[in-house]
Amino acid sequence: LELGGKDPAYVLADAKMDHAVANLVDGAFYNSGQCCCGIERVYVHEKVYDEFVEGFIAETKNYVVGNPLDQATTMGPMAQARFADLIREQKAEALRKGARA
């Protein structure tokens, strides 16, 4: 039984979009994205792709990055500097491939 893989999710064409977005954002960013069972890949049916992406972006804009001791913070720091470096590298690669930030 493998419990620490790439943890994909699939959004079907008939998905309840608000539910899918809220749960997949939470699944991806739980514990600042440092959970071994966190969502790492999301496959979205082409019929609902744009709606999902718009919802995902809107939901993530609600996150407040900051000091975890501040009640307004919803996402704290990375556990180790190397994790933050990895995220920076992944972001840079995504931007090179056409992603927008």
Image (tube, rainbow, N blue to C red):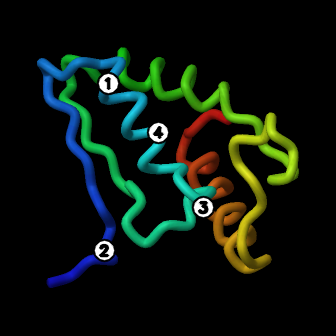
Residue 81: image location, x then y, percent = 79, 77
Q: What's the residue at 25%, 42% (across, down)?
A: 43
Badge 4 or badge 3: first in the primary sequence: 4
Mark 4 residue crowding within 10 angstroms, few (<14) / some (14–19) / many (20+): some
Q: Quadrant of the N terminus?
A: bottom left
Q: Quadrant of residue 6?
A: bottom left
User: How far apart are the alpha carbons under marks 3 and 1?
Assistant: 27 Å
Q: In the image, what residue type sits under mark 3?
A: Gln
Q: Nearer the viewer, mark 1 or mark 2?
A: 1
Q: Which numbered disc flags the more N-terminal residue, 4 or 1? A: 1
User: What residue is at 30 percent from the left and 74 percent from the top?
Assistant: 5
Q: Nearer the viewer, mark 3 or mark 1?
A: 1
Tell me the residue that label 2 is attached to: 5
Residue 40 lies, in percent from the top left, at 40, 57
Q: Position of residue 62 (x, y in %)?
A: 66, 26
Mark 4 and 1 residues: CB-CB less than 8 Å, in contact? no
Q: Hey, what amino acid is under mark 4?
A: Val
- Which class describes the residues within 10 Å of circle 3: few (<14), some (14-19), or many (20+)? few
Label 4 residue SS? helix
For marks 4 and 1, give the CA distance.
Answer: 10 Å
Residue that badge 1 annotates: 19
Looking at the image, tell me whether mark 3 or mark 2 is earlier in sequence order: 2
Q: Which residue is mark 4?
A: 25
Q: Earlier in the sequence, mark 3 or mark 1?
A: 1
Q: Amino acid at mark 1?
A: His
Which label was assigned to residue 90?
Answer: 3
